[in-house]
Image (spheres, rainbow, N blue to C red):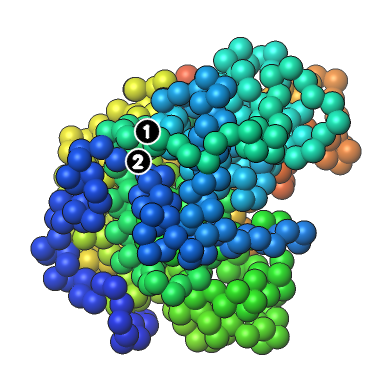
Amino acid sequence: MTVQHIETIPSVPGNHNLQSYESAYRSFRWEEAEKHFTWHRTGKCNMAYEAIDRHAEGALANKVALIYEDDDRKESYTFEQLSKLSNRFGNMLKGLGIGQGERIFFFMPRTPEVYVGIMGTLKIGAIVGPLFEAFMESAVTDRLSDAEAVAIVTTSKLKHRIPRDRLPHLKHVIIVDEQTEWQPGEVDFHVAMAQSSEELDITWVDREHPLILHYTSGSTGKPKGVLHVHGAMVQHYLTGKWVLDLRDDDIYWCTADPGWVTGTSYGIFAPWLNGATNLVRGGRFSPERWYRTIQDHKVTVWYSAPTAFRMLMAAGDETVDAYDLSSLRHILSVGEPLNPEVIRWGMKVYGRRIHDTWWMTETGAHMIVNFPAMDIRPGSMGKPLPGIEAAIIDDRGNLLPPNRLGNLAIRTGWPSMMRAIWNNPSKYEEYFRLSGWYVSGDSAYMDEDGYFWFQGRVDDVINTSGERVGPFEVESKLVEHPAVAEAGVIGKPDPIRGEIIKAFIALREGYAETSELLEEIRVFVRNGLSAHAAPREIEVLGKLPKTRSGKIMRRVLKAQELGLPTGDLSTIDD
Ligand code: WT7
């Protein structure tokens, strides 16, 4: 492959927290960053202490930690207030008999209760399991039962998607809003909070103690529970400082939901470990509301995703011009490739660079990024964080030279690396099959100057609007429909969403293809899994291409869809 990079957007000189990437990369040791935390001396730690209580006990006690707004609520909380509220929540859980290591899920819109609850859960050493509110019954059931969750925090509207009769471990359903009829096992959040003390002896844990369980999709099987530990805070803190470039007077807005790792690592931990004011916006996306949020709160650091930037771009430059966005100092993106076109547009309308960052649920924190003090090559993810060794390797683990496409891999052993796949040690080990490396499942190349360029997923995982969807979960739901005999699901490139979900199905005998039936099938997936997992396109085939061992050949479906050569068909069944 010959690659030529002509386009460079230089960094704007300024007081960046990381001034010289090259020298930091050469000399950095994780032990240095650890000295920031008290557990460097005690050996014990707690994420919630470092993120909230430490500030509440010190000079930042009355600083605003959380600004919350949606179309109905506008609130703010200081570090001291969050400390007391999360103490109350921790005491509430203790009162229910919940202790260290148990799993508490959050299944609700991102209101302040989620942030209070997550911190309170961590304070007693229990494990947080965040879920998107968009999940429907079977998605919720799979995750809660895999994790054997004992409690869930939810709303009166969403609780109907939690089938308690199928979840024997689930003892408590904590409801955060008003309802008239209470079922056994349901806890009134507001009543229980009022009855709980705001003093709590925090549970000090080892840095290897479990913190959070994020379910994410793989190409086969059920979603995987990616487990992170309290010690990840070292990397959350450091990347908050160097990559988000957080300063004392920042108003920081990460647009991600805590159901997704970006919404916890960078929507909760990194900003608060750095003592920053963290803005959370609930409610739906709209370009006008988003820009108004930036304008009204004078947001300075803004972390979002390519799909959002593309929707903002589609809304037109006049929309940008209608608002005062001059407070913005630093803009970042994650989730899927950030198109050079979007960066160029960002330069035009925001007058600033959008900094791409690459990482995954499994890596827990940033891996390869564009630092503020670094030249950007539009289309490149940037360079590895100091302390991170990234490489392009072949399928046997050999290093490949620059400009050769291969597996993007990271040398094992960074602080925020996942520590387990819940209940599934063999899945975990698959990531580390090449000795000494974490194999990401992404393919990429590195240019001569050490910039990394993302090329795609090597497996079949679909990335739609920045969210990972496993084709298998969608296929399984499709074949639950009485009309569907078999199904193959692919990601089809889409200018706004990155990829859309396209399903190929074969119908059972006695069913004929009609637009009503296809719509019914789409709604079936939507109601069973979630809106973002519902196929936007469904095509009926007589028969799906399969290997002799019966595996659906999604790559053949994809190649045919895109009009590309289908490649090696030696394993296909007739
Ligand atoms: C997958 C991880 C950790 C938050 C992001 C989503 C893709 C992520 C980029 C980027 C190109 C990206 C990769 C990765 N991805 N960031 N900057 N450029 N692709 O987390 O749901 O675990 O998905 O998202 O394919 O493997 P996730």
- Nearer to us in this view, 190 or 468: 190
In this rendering, the label closer to the viewer, 1 or 2: 1
Kind of residue sitting beneath label 2: Asn
Image vertical order of residue 434 relative to residue 54, above or below = above
Q: Is label 2 in a helix, a strand or a loop?
A: loop
For the view shown, which residue lies furthest in the left direction? 27
Q: Can residue 551 be seen in this view?
A: no
Q: Position of residue 295 (x, y in %)?
A: 63, 79
SS for callout 1: loop
Quadrant including the C terminus: top right
Res. 513 image quadrant = top right
User: What amino acid is at disc 1?
Assistant: Thr
Residue at 20%, 40% (x, y): give it.
42
- The answer to whether the residue labelled 1 contacts the one labelled 2, judged by CB atoms less than 8 Å apart, is yes
Q: Mark 2 points at which residue?
A: 46
Residue at horizontal 33 percent and vertical 48 percent from the top: 233
Where's residue 183, x and y in %?
77, 20
User: Label 1 belongs to which residue?
Assistant: 203
x 50%, y 86%: residue: 351
> Residue 175: percent from the left, percent from the top?
70, 33
Q: Is mark 1 within 8 Å of ligand 1?
A: no
Q: Earlier in the sequence, mark 1 or mark 2?
A: 2
Q: On the picture, is 72 further left or further right than 569? A: right
Q: Foreground residue, 56 or 32? A: 56
What crowding class fits label 1: few (fewer than 14 Cα within 10 Å), some (14-19), or many (20 or more)? some
Left/right of residue 391 with respect to residue 239 in the rendered view: left
Residue 273 shown left or right of residue 130 in the figure: left
Location of residue 355 with respect to 388 vertically, above or below: below
